Image: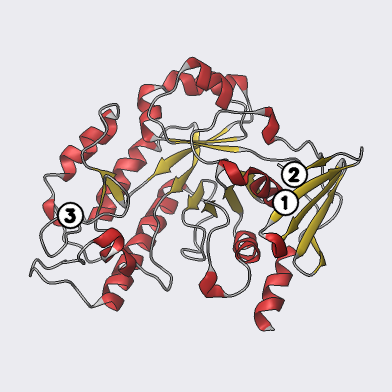
Amino acid sequence: MKKLIIISSIFVLTITVQAQKLANLWYLPTLTDYQMESISQYNLLIIDPEILIKCSSALDEMMVNNANLKIFLYINPTEIFEPMWPDKPWGIKLLAELQTKKSWWFYQPNGEKLGAWTGMKTLDMRSDCPEIKGQKYWQWILAKYLELLKDKRISGCLVDNAWGDDRAGIKWLANYNGQKGLDLNGDKKADTNWREINLAWTKGFRSFFADLRKAKGDNFTIIANPGNLSYREVDGKQFENFPYQHHHLGGPDWEVNMMIAKKYKMAIINPDEKDFLLGAVTALMLDNAYLAIGHNRLYHDFYKLDLSKATSKTMEISKGIWSRKFKEGNIFIDTNKGNKAWVEYKDGTKREK
């Protein structure tokens, strides 16, 4: 009963939403004129670091096209491609430097580097990682990103792979995709002191966030991925592949995601293309949310639901069915039927995809 009460209380919202807010996660290192024209129509653009270096003038043009465009920087302190993509000069230079700092990488007992995602390898964000020239890894990588963040056009960032600070910690990483464990001390044996490792990793990431905030100030927006309750000091969360799975918290995933999103100043609801309408309707049930469809998507008018302003709070109108009223219609999500989402417009039409 306690869990149900907590989940049901998340929708006590004030009616302040102005309009649908759209975000674009542009993780490509290049940008053509056509792409620039298209994605400048979003409300929020999150860009790969290479765009700042290779396409700086394009950012100026986009801000002329859309004076209200917000631009955030994508930051991934945790992992790096090895080898690096040939069209990423900033990344190539970063990797070359890191390859001279062998004690900052995570290794398996067989000496191979550890990594979560295809083609990427993990760096040591722990607070007690080895120092090189008076710096821990998290301090070194933060300094690299702070150089980019001197650009006054950037008003926030999205920090990817902000693992730790939750029950899972980073223990899952050691055997992910058939890897053979984590060997921090080089004794060719898999480490087992996971409580100590998780605490050190979380402490390192907290220091990263604290120094980032100190450097950029309170008006700078810090978003983190994944969409859980870790690192409450950040401003918001990205809910990638929405709805982000939270089976261990109890309750339906959709409702748990909403509970978490409400606890932050900002949420990025980030479904795959096939779940577009679920993501769009969900974002409109929150006052603090942006909708971002997958990654690297050009702007399309069909992303807009054209509902104008909200005229009610989000409410559970019957068990597992949630709704909110807008000037031009009502939105619905039925969590009893696989999170089915739809829109009913005032003119009698209905949108189900």
Badge 3 amino acid: Lys
Task: Tell me where residue 85 appears, x and y as whole percent.
Answer: 27, 32
Residue 113: mark in rendering: 3
Q: Secondary structure at mark 2?
A: loop
Task: Specify few, some or many for label 3: CA neighbours under 10 Å numbering under 14, 14-19, or 20 or more.
Answer: some
Task: Tell me where residue 313 appears, x and y as whole percent.
Answer: 81, 57
Q: Report the Cα–Cα distance between label 2 and label 3.
A: 46 Å
In the rendered view, tell whether residue 28 sits above or below residue 245. Answer: above
Residue 314 shows in the view: no
Q: Secondary structure at mark 1?
A: strand
Q: Tell me the residue at 61%/20% (across/down).
A: 65
Task: Specify few, some or many for label 1: CA neighbours under 10 Å numbering under 14, 14-19, or 20 or more.
Answer: many
Image marks 1 and 2: residues in contact by CB distance under 8 Å: yes
For this rendering, which residue is in front, 298 or 127? 298
Q: Tell me the residue at 29%/59% (across/down).
A: 177
What residue would you read off at disc 2? Answer: 352
